[in-house]
Image (cartoon, helix red, strand yellow):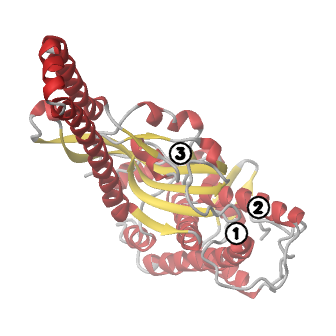
């Protein structure tokens, strides 16, 4: 169960359900639901065509860095070309995440996880020098109710609200580092997307992260060894004379004392290994259910989400201008506020519309007319005709992504 998500630039609604909801509005007269549904489908189709072209471009840009690719390179890249392709890939990936409603997490936003353990006792240590590049993006900053057990409550199960990210995306490129054992792939770029990650567990997703034991577990490991050594020392001091006398006649007594110390040491080391295995098992179980996709699959998922996000915003913007603005129209700020208010009042969603974002979508689709700083939408029937012309535009191939071609973060003119 999630509590209300804080204000974000993402509309967490299925596109088909949003259109059904709008078409069921009681203010619509006969024929209007059908024409608005047709318009919505046309808007979604135009975005689908545009994003499909952009997906093909980004897949081509990612190809030299995809660790899962099984194709043979016909055109090898020079070191300079490869670095340029990498820079463009990182920039375009950030562009895509922004349109899918994600925000980049700064070092200051993730460093608290270095100093705190999660509610499940997992305390991580990360050396960021193991990465040539690493960036973390999140969406859905909210609270989620989970069950936990604490030792001072006799391990009784209790519910607690845990701060989480509904979606978390990683992009990283590794470098040779002692933390990373075995053969390390330093040539490729890794992409990961997860769901429902507690904020204090973000760092456990990074390669090379190490489990740091809690004070309780360090005590459970260290106390047997210290108590054993203290007991042995006390016995030695108390019975030194007797031990020396017995040593003369029975050397096995000292060997028994030494064996006892070794036994305590082994018990402590075994307890340490068992605790580490328990933590890693907890980590593995958690990530098994929270990992959504990897590498090229992340691109497919994010493009789908970005496409639907822009389609939703465009449809809502058109709806608000069409139904509520009146003949005088609205300013860009009025439209942004109207979309936010509509979602808050009708579907109980808190959405923050970036400055002029709603109007920008309609302008890209050529669905608005302006009088000074005020805007009105064109009628639905005319809007459908305008959008249909998008399908008849001749396809202009993009230049090869070698640093000279057009990149995704440069908006394609319509």
**Which of the marked residues, 2 or 3, is nearer the chain's N terminus?**
2
Residue with the mark numbered 2 = 86
Residue at the image point whose x is 64% and y is 43% from the top: 129
Q: Answer whether labels 1 and 3 touch (C-beta < 8 Å).
A: no
Q: Outermost residue toward the front?
A: 249
> Where does label 1 land, which residue?
65
User: Gap between marks 2 and 3, in whole Å?
Assistant: 38 Å
Taking the spot 52% from the left edge, 81% from the top edge, the residue there is 38
Does residue 215 sit above or below 120 in this rendering? Answer: above
Give the quarter of the figure containing the C terminus.
Answer: bottom right
SS at circle 2: helix
Q: Would you call the spot at circle 1 few (<14 residues within 10 Å), some (14-19), or many (20 or more)?
A: many
**In the figure, is residue 75 to the left or right of 272?**
right
Specify which label sits upstream in the sequence, 1 or 2: 1
Q: Nearer the viewer, residue 252 or 11?
A: 252
Q: Nearer the viewer, residue 128 or 350?
A: 128
Residue 322 appears anywhere in the view: no
Residue 298, quarter of picture: bottom right
Check disc 3 and report the residue beneath it: 337
């Amino acid at each position: 169960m999630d509590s209300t998500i804080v204000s974000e630039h993402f509309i967490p609604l299925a596109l088909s359900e949003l259109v059904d909801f709008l078409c069921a509005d009681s203010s619509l007269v006969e024929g209007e639901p059908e024409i608005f549904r047709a318009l919505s489908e046309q808007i979604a189709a135009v975005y689908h065509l545009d994003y499909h072209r952009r997906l093909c471009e980004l897949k081509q840009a990612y190809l030299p860095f995809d660790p899962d690719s099984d194709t043979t390179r016909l055109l090898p890249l020079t070191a300079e070309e490869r670095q340029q392709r990498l820079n463009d890939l990182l920039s375009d990936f950030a562009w895509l995440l922004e349109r899918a409603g994600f925000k980049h997490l700064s070092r200051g936003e993730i460093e608290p996880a270095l100093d705190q353990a999660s509610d499940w006792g997992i305390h991580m240590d990360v050396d960021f020098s193991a990465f040539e590049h690493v960036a973390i993006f999140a969406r859905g900053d909210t609270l989620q109710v989970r069950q936990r057990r604490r030792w001072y409550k006799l391990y009784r199960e209790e519910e607690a609200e845990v701060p989480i990210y509904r979606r978390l995306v990683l992009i990283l490129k590794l470098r040779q580092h002692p933390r990373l054992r075995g053969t390390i792939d330093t040539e490729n770029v890794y992409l990961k997307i997860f769901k429902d990650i507690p904020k204090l567990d973000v760092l456990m997703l990074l390669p090379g992260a190490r489990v740091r034991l809690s004070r309780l577990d360090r005590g459970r490991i260290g106390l047997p060894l210290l108590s054993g050594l203290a007991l042995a020392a006390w016995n030695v001091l108390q019975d030194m004379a007797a031990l020396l006398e017995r040593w003369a006649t029975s050397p096995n007594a000292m060997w028994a004392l030494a064996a006892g110390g070794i036994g305590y040491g082994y018990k402590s080391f075994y307890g340490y290994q068992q605790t580490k295995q328990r933590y890693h098992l907890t980590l593995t179980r958690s990530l098994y259910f929270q990992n959504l996709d990897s590498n090229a699959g992340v691109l497919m998922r994010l493009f789908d989400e970005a496409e639907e996000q822009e389609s939703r915003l465009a449809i809502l913007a058109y709806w608000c201008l069409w139904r509520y603005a009146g003949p005088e129209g609205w300013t860009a700020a009025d439209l942004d506020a109207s979309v936010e208010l509509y979602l808050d009042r009708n579907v109980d969603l808190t959405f923050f519309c970036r400055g002029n974002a709603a109007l920008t979508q309609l302008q890209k689709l050529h669905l608005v007319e302006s009088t000074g700083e005020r805007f009105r939408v064109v009628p639905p029937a005319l809007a459908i005709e305008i959008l249909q012309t998008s399908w008849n535009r001749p396809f202009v191939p993009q230049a090869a992504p070698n640093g000279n071609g057009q990149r995704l973060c440069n908006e394609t003119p319509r």
